[in-house]
Image: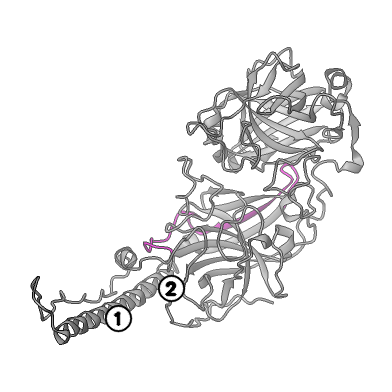
């Protein structure tokens, strides 16, 4: 097994700079980082810089230069360059020392002293909730920036699990002792969640300081002081599609992180661990980590462990259902038209609600039907490529969820369409193939606009990809850039005594923290009309919740999950 040790083990001190692919670009300046890194270390000394270089010989235009004098000048410059290289190495060593000493600063901070931890399956969310309770405000302490990525400090709350790497989308891991860990980290010097805008400022590359979630694979590595490092990998094909372009087994899945006083929690949809009912969590750990771009060193090392709280490791989801949504074997086909929609009880709405649950800072969209939900699949293609959907039109502005320069009615849609897949980041049918899940009901944001040419009176807004004023969210599917459609990866599942409720969990942060809006409920038959240029997604038939589509229903706020 991979061990978790607080023994200090010195790594190789060689500081040759290597390139870190993609998100890190080329090698980084350590000089800029020195000032920021050393301010926190009162006894760190900055080496004195070299004196100004003067050459012994000056040459006048039009007069011959003697080779000996030229060489003498070059000798002086070579000596100065060598001195400068030595200075840079001293600065690098000082920076490395300063960053590593940061780990000692937080050793006595109560925010990293874990008093208890829990991991449990929550049926009302069909999700696993990972929680650590600290002795002070969890997530309140951020690392002091180093000023660059090489040597950058990382603070983390880490759950060590018994999941297999393949359960979370990692392939090709051959180390039998590797540990899959869920890590909640902060690192102000770089951003490794390019799909997510955690601070809601419309920039996706500046959020590293905000605590966010990762899956990582940890292995024993005595080049790290605490004996652990993230396993390196240069083959992006072995990583989930949501992984950032970094050469190691690290994924950025976008799970909701909830900071609530002394507690920090992560909500993980059960599908995202391949509904593994037997896995457990062996330990809850708080740690200081550090990026090391030196050749021969692990890229992300665990340098200091603050708390290593042993947990039972028992299976935590044994009572969970086998599937979040009906599998194809439990579905039947229906025609893609208004008549079929009106006759089908699984699209007849009894109630539609959206509740804001304060203690998980999330919106819960629910639609109750007259029969088991999500059991019908449409394969009739006489009027275009068919789509079935449960749709929540809202009064939210499209820019709250990442659309730019586009207007219309923003709707949350849970759809099925066997003929194509438009969620290439997500594996809804849990078969390790991200491109064959269209039939399985899944979640979109769409912008709807009135359209008399569509039988239901609406279509999805078309986008001009050449218009720089228009833009799609980072999770919008590639190849569908002409439709105002996003695939955000929210968790959809059926619940209720008769599986007659379809439910979607939306973290409030993913709607710019807007939790006071109006909504409605609609079931719909839709079709992609490829005869138009560009193709149009038409709403050809609808059934309303209530008399008409008025978006006049308001959100209920509840304190906790007991209000669902």
Left or right, residue 356 beside residue 304: right
Majority secondary structure of magenta residues: loop
* Whether residue 280 can be seen here: no
- Tell me: residue 362, above or below residue 210: above
* Whether residue 111 can be seen here: yes
- Tell me: residue 294, above or below residue 155: below
Instruction: Give the image location of residue 117, x and y in percent.
Output: 62, 59
Q: Residues within 10 Å of mark 1 (few under 14, many from 20)?
A: few
The earlier-in-sequence mark between 2 and 1 is: 2
Residue hosting label 2: 17
Q: Secondary structure at mark 1?
A: helix
Q: Secondary structure at mark 2?
A: loop
The part of the image, by quadrant, that contains residue 385 is top right
Instruction: Give the image location of residue 511, x and y in percent.
Output: 56, 35
The part of the image, by quadrant, that contains residue 525 is top right
- Tell me: residue 180, above or below residue 226: above
Instruction: Give the image location of residue 120, x and y in percent.
Output: 71, 54
Left or right, residue 65 beside residue 306: left
Find the residue positioned furthest to the bottom.
Answer: 68
Q: Give the residue displayed 48% in from the left and 63% down from the top.
A: 154
The structure's colour scheme is one colour
Q: Give the residue displayed 82% in from the left and 22% down from the top.
A: 348
Instruction: Give the image location of residue 284, x and y in percent.
Output: 61, 64
Q: Nearer the viewer, residue 475 or 452?
A: 452
Q: Nearer the viewer, residue 479 or 401?
A: 479
Query: Which residues fall within the magenta stretch?
Result: 121-149
Q: CA distance from mark 2 to mark 1?
A: 15 Å
Residue hosting label 1: 86
């Amino acid at each position: 097994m991979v061990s978790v040790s607080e023994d200090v083990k010195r790594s190789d001190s060689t500081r040759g700079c290597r390139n870190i692919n993609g998100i890190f670009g080329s090698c980084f300046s350590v000089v800029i980082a020195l000032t920021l890194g050393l301010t926190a270390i009162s006894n760190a000394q900055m080496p004195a810089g070299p004196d100004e270089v003067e050459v012994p010989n000056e040459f006048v235009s039009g007069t011959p230069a003697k080779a000996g004098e030229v060489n003498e000048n070059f000798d002086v410059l070579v000596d100065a360059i060598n001195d400068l290289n030595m200075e840079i190495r001293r600065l690098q060593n000082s920076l490395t020392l300063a960053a590593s000493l940061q780990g000692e600063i937080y050793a006595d901070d109560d925010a990293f002293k874990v008093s208890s931890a829990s991991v449990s399956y929550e049926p009302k969310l069909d999700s696993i909730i990972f929680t650590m309770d600290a002795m002070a405000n969890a997530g309140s302490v951020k690392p002091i920036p180093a000023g660059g990525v090489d040597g950058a400090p990382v603070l983390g709350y880490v759950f060590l699990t018994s999941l297999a790497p393949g359960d979370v989308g990692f392939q090709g891991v051959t180390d039998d002792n590797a540990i899959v860990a869920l890590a909640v980290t902060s690192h102000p010097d770089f951003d490794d969640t390019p799909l997510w805008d955690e601070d809601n400022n419309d920039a996706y590359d500046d959020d590293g300081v905000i605590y966010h979630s990762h899956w990582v694979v940890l292995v024993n590595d005595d080049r790290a002081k605490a004996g652990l490092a993230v396993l390196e990998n240069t083959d992006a094909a072995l990583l989930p599609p949501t992984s950032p372009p970094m050469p190691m087994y690290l994924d950025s899945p976008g799970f909701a992180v909830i900071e609530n006083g002394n507690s920090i929690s992560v909500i993980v949809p059960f599908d995202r661990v391949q509904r593994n009912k037997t896995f457990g969590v062996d330990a809850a750990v708080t740690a200081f980590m550090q990026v090391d771009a030196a050749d021969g060193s692990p890229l992300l090392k665990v340098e200091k462990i603050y708390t290593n709280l042993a947990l039972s490791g028992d299976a935590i989801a044994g009572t969970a259902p086998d599937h979040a949504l009906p599998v194809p074997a439990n579905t039947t086909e229906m025609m893609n038209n208004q008549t079929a929609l009106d006759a089908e009880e699984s699209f007849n709405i009894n109630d539609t609600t959206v509740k804001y649950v304060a203690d998980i800072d999330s919106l819960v969209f629910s639609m109750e039907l007259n029969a088991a939900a999500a059991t019908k699949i449409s394969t009739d293609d006489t009027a275009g490529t068919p789509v079935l959907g449960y749709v929540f039109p809202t009064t939210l502005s499209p820019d709250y969820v990442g659309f730019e320069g586009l207007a219309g009615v923003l709707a949350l849609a849970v759809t099925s369409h066997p003929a194509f897949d438009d969620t290439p980041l997500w594996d809804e049918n849990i078969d390790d193939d991200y491109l064959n899940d269209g039939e399985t009901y899944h979640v979109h944001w769409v912008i709807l606009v009135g359209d008399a040419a569509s039988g239901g009176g609406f279509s999805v807004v078309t986008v001009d990809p050449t218009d720089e004023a228009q833009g799609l969210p980072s999770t919008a599917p590639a190849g569908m850039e002409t439709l105002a459609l996003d695939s955000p990866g929210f968790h959809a599942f059926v619940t209720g005594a008769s599986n007659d409720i379809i439910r979607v969990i939306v973290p409030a942060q993913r709607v710019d923290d807007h939790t006071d809006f109006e909504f409605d409920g609609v079931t719909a038959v839709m079709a992609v009309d490829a005869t138009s240029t560009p193709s149009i997604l038409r709403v050809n038939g609808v059934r309303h919740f209530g008399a008409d589509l008025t978006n006049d229903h308001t959100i209920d706020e509840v304190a906790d999950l007991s209000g669902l």
